[in-house]
Image (tube, grey):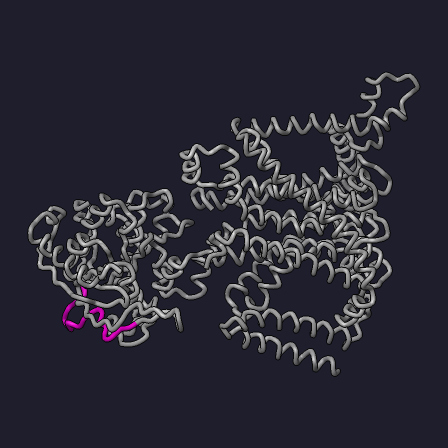
Amino acid sequence: MNAGVALLLLAIGGPVLLALLARSDGRAGRVATPLVFGALVLLAWQVVCAGFGVPKILLPTPSEVALAIAHHVPMLAADFMQTVVRSVLPGWLIGCGSGLLAAILLDRSEFLRRGVLPLGSLVSAMPIVGVAPIMVMWFGFDWQSKAAVVVVMTFFPMLVNATAGLASTGAMERDLMRSYAARDWQTLFKLRLPNALPFIFNALKLNSTLALIGAIVAEFFGTPIVGMGFRISTEVARMNLDVVWAEITLAAVVGSASFAVLALIERTVTFWHPSFRT
Amino acid sequence: MIRRAAPVAVVMLAVLVVWYAASVWLNYDTAANLADEGATRWQIVGDTMRLDRPLLPAPHQIVAEMITSIFGYPPDNPRSLLYHAAVTAYAAGVGFAIALALGVVLAVGIVHVRTLERSLMLWIIASQTVPVLAIAPMVVVVLGNIGLRGMLPKALIAGWLSFFPITTGMVTGLRAPDPMQRDLMRTYSASGRQVFAMLRWPASMAFLFPSLKVAAALALVGAIVAELPTGAQAGLGARLLTGSYYGQTLQIWAALFAAALLALLAIAMIDLAQSGLVRRRGGRL
Amino acid sequence: MAAELAVVAATPPRAETADGAPVVRAQGLSIVFGSGDQRTTALQDVTLDIARGSFVSLIGPSGCGKTTLLRAIADLERPSAGTLVVNGMTPERARLARAYGYVFQAPALYPWRTVERNVMLPLEIMGLKPEERRKRAARYLDLVGLGEFRRRFPWQLSGGMQQRASIARALSFEPSLLLMDEPFGALDEITRDGLNMHLHELWHRTGMTVVFVTHSIPEAVFLSSRIVVMSPRPGKVVDVIDVELPATRDLDLRETPAFLKVAQRVREVLRAGHSYD
C-alpha cells in the first residue's frame, strides 16, 4: 500500500515539478529538467519494482543493477576489453578509414561515383548485421570476426556521407582554386576535405553506434566466453537480469561517451561551420 | 535513364566478377580436398562453384537456393523461405506501425508542450547513441516469461528501434517553418490548430519520409535480431542462426538476400507513398 | 498591367474618413531588445500619426528600426514603452480583428500550395466559404496579373511573380491597412519599377492605407504621400516629409525637377541623420 501512495505522489508530483522546472528559462532549467526527469524515472522504477514485488527475473530494481555493477567490475572490464577495445575500435577505424579512402578515390571518376553511390546508399539501408554468421564462419569465434562485421557495417555509411561531403563544395570556391592553378591534391586538402568534415563527422558519430551494435549482435552468433554480447545472451538465459542490465548500462555509457567525445572533437575541428556559430 | 543506369550496371558487373573470383579463391582448398585423385586444376575450379557448403557461394548458387526455397515448397511450409520472410516482415511491419503512431504523437507533444520538450529531447537524442539492439534478447526472454511470445515481442523491439528516427525527424520537421512563415500565420491571428494543420504538418513531410526510410530499415534489423534468442523457430533471423549452427552457408546467404529484398521492398513502398505526395505538390516535397 | 486593372471590378475597401482619426498613432514608442550587455534600443521615442488613405514610407539605413516599427504595428514586436494604437485599438486587438495585410521581405509562400491556394490561405483561416475563397483568389490574382499562373507552384515562378502572389495574398481578405516590409528589395531594378507602378495604381484605386518600408529613395518618393526618415543607433524618426506630387503618377515622373527636389531633400535628411560610423 505504501508503494501505491509513493507511486501516486510521484505520478502527480513529478509532472508538476517538471512543469515548474521547464518554465525557468536559464541554463539551470535547461540542464536540470532532463536530469530531474531521468531521476524521476529511476525513482518510479525503483518504487514499482520494490513496492509491488516485481520478480527479479522480470525487472530488477535500479539499486540491484547498481549492486551488480559493483560486484562484477572485473568481469565488466574484461567484456569491455573484448568487445569495445578488441572488436569495435579496430573495426570502426578500418571501416571508417577505408570508407573515406574509397570516397576520395571515387571522387576522381564521375562515372564510378554515379555507379557506386546508388548501390552504396542501398547497402546502407540493408540489415547488414546479418553478415555476422558469415564473418564468424570466415574469421572464427574470436574478436576478428566481430571486427570484420563492424568494418562491413561502418564502411558504407562513411562512403556515402564522405562522397556527399566532397561533392558539397560550391562552384565558386572550386573556381577560386582553379584560378590559382591549384593541383588536384591541393584542392582536395585545402578545400574539399575541410568542407566535407561535417559530413565525415556525421558518419563517424553514426558509425560509433553502429559499430557497437554490430559487435554485440555478432557475439550472439558465437564467441569465446567473454564479451558484452556473449554476457547478455548467456545471463538472459540464466535469468540473471541484474547482470544483463549492468552490461546494458555499460553499453549505454560506452555509446554515449564515444558519441560525446566525437562531438567534442567535431566542435574543435569544425568550429567555423554555421551549425556551431552563434 | 540509360545515363543513370549504365554506371550502376558496370559497377554491379564488376562486383559479380570479383565475387566469382573470390569464391573460386576461397573455396579452392575445400574443392581440392573433395576432388578425385588426379583431377585437373580446371576441374577443381569448376567444383568450387558446386560445393554444398562453400565458404563463399557463387552468386548463381545463392539465386538457385533462393528459387528452390521460395518456389520449391508451399508458402506455409517452414522450409519455404517465403514463409520465414513473411514472419519477419509481419513483425517488422507491426513494429513500424507502432513506431509511426507513437513517434508522430510524441513529436507533436514535444513541439507543443515545453515540459515534454525539456524533459524528453535530451534522452531521445542520447538514446540514439546507445546500442538499443543489445536489449533485444532480454526483452524477448522477459516478455516470454510473462506469456508474450511470437510476433509481439519482435514487433515491440522493431518498433522501439524505429521509433527514434521518426520522432527526431518529425520534431525537426514540425519546427522547420522559418520565422517569416510563422509570422505570416500570426498576422492572420491563426489558432494553434490552424498553424499546425496548414503550416507545421505540411512542412514536416519533407523530413518525415527520409526518416521513415531509416526507420523501416531499422525495424527490419530489430525483427531479425529479436528472432535470434528465442530458440529460432521462424523468421529470417532464425534461418541465419540455424544456418550458422549447421554450417549451411547457402541458407545463410539466401536469408541475407531475402532480408535485403525485404528492405528494398519497404523502401520502395515508402518511395511510392512519397511520390504520390510529391505529385500532389507539383513535383517537390 | 494598367489595362488589367481597369477591367477588374474590385470593391475598394476604401475607409470612410468621417472620423478623421489616424489609422496608426504612435506616441513615445520605444522598443528595446535583449537585456544586460546585449541591450539594443531598436526604436526610441517615436511619435507618428499615419492618416487614413495615405501611403507612408519608412526610409533609413540598416538598423534604423524601420522594420521594427512596422512589426510593432503588426503586433509582431511588443513595445517597451509608449503607446501604439492601430485602428483605434491595441495592435493585438487589431491583429485579432485581422485589420491589416502584411507583405514580408521575401514572398514567404508555402511551397506545398499552389499560387491560388496560397492566396486562399488567409481566407481559409478566417473561415470563408470555399466558393467565396476561389472568387477572391481569382479577383486578386487577376489584379496582380497572375491569373493564368494560379495552378502553378510558387517555386515555378520568378521572384517578381512570387512577390506579386504574396501581395495578392495580403490583399485577398481586403484589409484597410497594408503593411509592406521592403517587399521589392530582393528584385532586379526592372521588375521593381514594374511592381512600383503596379502598387501605385492599386493604392490609388483602393484608397487603402499603406505603410511601406524601403531603403530606396526613388521608390519612396515615387510611391508615397508622406516619407518618414529614420536614423540608426538608436532608431528614431528624424524628419517627416510630405510629398507634394500629383496623385496619379507614372514612371516618367522620376525625371521631373519636382521629383528630384523631393528626392534631394530626403537624401539630405538621411545624410544628416547618419554619421557613417
- Residue A1 can be seen in this image: yes
Q: Position of residue B182 (x, y in %)?
A: 40, 60
Q: Is residue A256 above or below residue B223?
A: below
Which residue of the protein is positioned furthest toward the left in this rendering? C257
Q: Position of residue B277 (x, y in %)?
A: 49, 46
Residue at (7% x, 49% y) in the render: C256
| Predominant secondary structure, magenta span | loop
Q: Does B169 sit left or right of C181 as displayed?
A: right
Q: Does C182 sit left or right of C121 as displayed?
A: left
Residue at (74% x, 83% y) in the render: A2
- Residue C91, image quadrant: bottom left
- Residue C99 can be seen in this image: no
Total numbered labels placed on residues in the image: 0
Q: Is residue C53 above or below residue A188?
A: below
Residue C14 vs residue B140, the one in the foreground: B140
Q: Is residue B41 above or below residue B261?
A: above
Residue C179 vs residue C94, the one in the foreground: C179
Q: Position of residue A106 (x, y in %)?
A: 58, 33
Q: Position of residue C62 (x, y in %)?
A: 28, 59
What range of the chain is rendered magenta?
Answer: C13-30
| B20 inside magenta stretch | no
